[in-house]
């Protein structure tokens, strides 16, 4: 299996170039279902230990069904499959340019939840125009064991998020274990209390937000991903969900730049334009760097050839 690894503002992406499963040529959403139903071993084998880590997001390079798209991408992590992934889209664009497969300029990527545009402005910097994002619920009060009542919004940014300013501790890297534990408890409480996205979709990302820690940024966040790993980047879909909430309250106008800082201090520059029915179309700018290109081997005698799923992914 041929892969190229990158990180986007600290968050790793593994782009699968060759050696992936045969998913046919149908719509990306249908191919993702085939992937999950028939080839889930490939997900754990390619990105979980011992070849990867809980923080790695995989992106399977596919032929698009739309001829205007440069590539199709199916995203996955240690817990399952993602509708969209902002940092991985940026990482894929930078990686494909590194390989000489795309040039600088505007490109379109097909994903299971729609087409995203990517403007590659230099070999390391890209801006994604994400799928339409929106706030579904405002000010939900959630009873969380050990935390009491926690208030937050539910928003869609390509994945479902619960966003809260009720912090269990300061948004500092030394508190990552405590923030992870608190966010995991919120996620469990959302499921237990029947709070979902549209059509009963699970809210599988939790985002804490607060003031920025460095000059020039507008806010800092901590995002817990579905498999229990925290996002090293400011999270592309999480920043999109944040923009949707800011737009809904009138705290950020179309075209105004919002600089989102991650828990490790990396940044995305974000803005939006108006979409339909109160939705916003976010644009997220970040940097990615290629850090490796390799061939993964799968020995039939290896007891961990299919990877070691994380304990959280199995819970």
Image (spheres, rainbow, N blue to C red):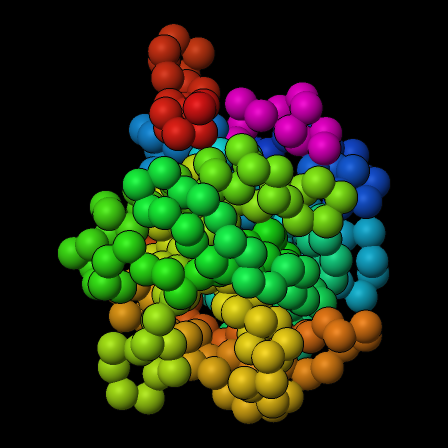
Q: Residue at x 75, y 58 (%)?
A: 114
| Image location (x, y in percent) of residue 117 | 67, 70
* Relative vertical location of residue 91 with respect to residue 191 in this rendering, above or below: below
Please tell me whether the stretch drawn in magenta is mainly helix, strand or loop.
helix
| Image location (x, y in percent) of residue 163 | 49, 60
Name the residue nearer the viewer: 248 or 241: 248
Q: Residue at x 20, y 54 (%)?
A: 175
Question: Is residue 266 visible from the viewing direction of this image?
Answer: yes
| Image location (x, y in percent) of residue 135 | 64, 65
Q: Residue at x 44, y 11 (%)?
A: 300
State the extent of the magenta-drawn residues as a range: 33-43
Furthest residue in direction top, as rendered: 301
Residue 174 falls within the magenta-colored stretch: no
Quarter-of-image position of residue 210: bottom left
Q: Residue at x 56, y 86 (%)?
A: 252
Residue 38 falls within the magenta-colored stretch: yes
Quarter-of-image position of residue 157: bottom right
């Amino acid at each position: 299996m041929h892969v190229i690894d990158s990180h986007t503002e600290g968050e790793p992406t593994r782009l699968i170039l060759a050696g992936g499963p045969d998913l046919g040529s149908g719509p990306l959403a249908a191919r993702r279902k085939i992937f999950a139903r028939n080839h889930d071993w490939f997900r754990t084998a390619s990105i979980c230990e011992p070849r990867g880590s809980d923080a790695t997001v995989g992106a399977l390079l596919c032929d698009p069904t739309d001829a205007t798209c440069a590539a199709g991408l199916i995203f996955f992590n240690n817990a399952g499959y993602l509708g969209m992934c902002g940092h991985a889209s940026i990482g894929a664009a930078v990686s494909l340019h590194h390989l000489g497969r795309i040039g600088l300029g505007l490109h379109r990527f097909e994903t299971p939840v729609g087409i995203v545009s990517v403007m590659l402005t230099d070999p390391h910097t890209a801006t994604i125009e994400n799928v339409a994002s929106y706030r579904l619920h405002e000010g939900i009060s959630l009873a969380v064991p050990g935390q009491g009542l926690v208030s937050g919004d539910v928003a869609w940014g390509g994945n479902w998020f619960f966003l809260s300013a009720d912090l269990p501790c300061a948004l500092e890297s030394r508190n990552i274990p405590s923030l992870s534990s608190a966010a995991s408890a919120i996620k469990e409480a959302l499921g237990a209390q029947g709070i979902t996205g549209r059509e009963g979709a699970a809210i599988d990302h939790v985002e804490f937000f607060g003031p920025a820690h460095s000059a020039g940024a507008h806010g800092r966040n901590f995002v817990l991903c579905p498999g229990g790993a925290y996002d090293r980047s400011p999270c592309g879909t999480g920043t999109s969900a944040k923009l949707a909430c800011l737009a809904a309250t009138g705290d950020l106008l179309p075209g105004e730049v919002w600089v989102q800082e991650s828990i490790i201090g990396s940044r995305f520059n974000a803005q939006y334009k108006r979409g339909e029915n109160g939705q916003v179309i976010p644009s997220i700018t970040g940097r990615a760097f290629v850090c490796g290109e390799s061939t993964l081997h799968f020995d039939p005698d290896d007891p961990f050839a299919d990877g070691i799923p994380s304990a959280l992914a199995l819970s």
